[in-house]
Amino acid sequence: MTKPKIVGYFTAWSIYARSFNVSDIDATKLTHINYAFFNLDSNGKVFSGDNWADTDKHFEGDSWNEEGNNLYGNLKQLALLKKKYRHLKILISIGGWTWSTNFGSVTANPVTRKNLVDSLVKLVKDFYIDGIDIDWEYPKTPQEGENYVKLVRELRIELDNYAKEIEERIPFLITAAMPCGPDNYNKIPLEEFSKYVNYLNLMAYDFSGSWSEITGHQSNLYDFLGIPLSVNKAVTDYLKSRVPKNKIVIGIPMYGRAFENTEGIGAKFNGIGSGSFEPGIYDYKVLPRDENSKEIYIEQLGASYSYNPVTKELITYDSPQVIGEKIKFIKDKKLNGVMFWDLSSDLSTNNTRSLLLNAFNGFNSLEHLDDSVNHLNYPLSIYDNVKKQFN
């Protein structure tokens, strides 16, 4: 049996206004960290979206007079973290909502697709990571879905070749962030796609928001008001498409989506509020927002929200109770764990309301989770300190 995973996204921009660094991550409660995001150009070359954050920034303990060409930034911090915690695997995530523009054209052409594969393998060689997470949002046509399969198939071959070249017995990982809307996932040949990836992170959130006609749940486990958007609906369709259940990881939001001037769930609304860092989106750690906001859990939907009858503000998010319900669902269906977007928005794991803590406790500790060891040997890296394993 495949042991379940707890995957957390850590974003490059967390270190700015959010003041959340790698040193703030509780690595004892995670099996994988996806570092978001790297970008790709129209020729298929993958590149850092923020050199200073990714590779250049000197953190506490980093030398300013180390000889040679050395890796710093968040990626060095993550490398040191996985060196300390051998069960922790680090992946670089490519694309995301903002940087998915070039996937379609790049994967359509065998030449640029090969450039992309080579570029992704080079990331693994250079950056002390255990694999690649692809976050293409989203293939627009069935042909783009077919090209997506070609990409992961070719990447699987080249990553395996690289592992052989350096005599590494543990394969490098390929994962993908996957849609939960039928319009998007029906364009991807899911059964074929799943053959070449280690697991799929289902983005099981943003089911409702500023674009909705009425207030709704953004990450409900079961269908709400007959709207066929739920975690269960997406999982059912993925399983019907013959994706192995042990390759499905359920994404959970560490944020809430707000609706203003509303009478409650399923009602009209006007406005979405200021949010923590962007309009309409509040970090989970500030929810519920005040003493007038009551947290409501709806067991039959596997969903929760807060409502303030004074300000008429409703925020949809996952409470610890919902996490418990989702872990039970994952265990019952023998799925492969949870993924969180993103780690900066959670409470500290010292707090009993931390979503990460509740997920970890739901799986009954690390020995019941994926404790496969990470990679430490990167002899072909362009960075001297990576080649020396930071010794």
Image (cartoon, rainbow, N blue to C red):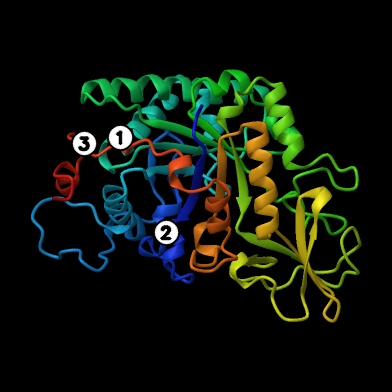
Mark closer to the observer (2, 1):
2
Q: Which residue is at 10% across, 63% downward?
A: 65
Tell me residue 117's x, y (percent). Answer: 39, 28
Tell me if residue 176 comes above or below residue 68 in the rendering: above
Crowd tier of the residue under label 2, counting other residues whose Cα lies within 10 Å: few below 14, some 14–19, many 20 or above: some
Instruction: Say if mark 2 contacts mark 1, CB within 8 Å.
Output: no
Q: Name the residue under label 3.
A: 377
In depth, the one of 360 and 187 nearer the eye is: 360
Label 2 SS: loop
Q: In which quarter of the image is residue 265?
A: bottom right
Q: Which mark is first along the chain, 1 or 2?
A: 2
Tell me residue 355's x, y (percent). Answer: 58, 58
Amino acid on which disc 2 is placed: Asp
Q: Name the residue under label 2.
A: 26
Crowd tier of the residue under label 1, counting other residues whose Cα lies within 10 Å: few below 14, some 14–19, many 20 or above: some
Q: Which residue is at 28% across, 37% downward?
A: 375
Q: Which residue is at 57% across, 44% downward?
A: 338
- Distance from the alpha carbon under mark 2 to that under mark 1: 28 Å
Q: Quadrant of residue 214?
A: bottom right
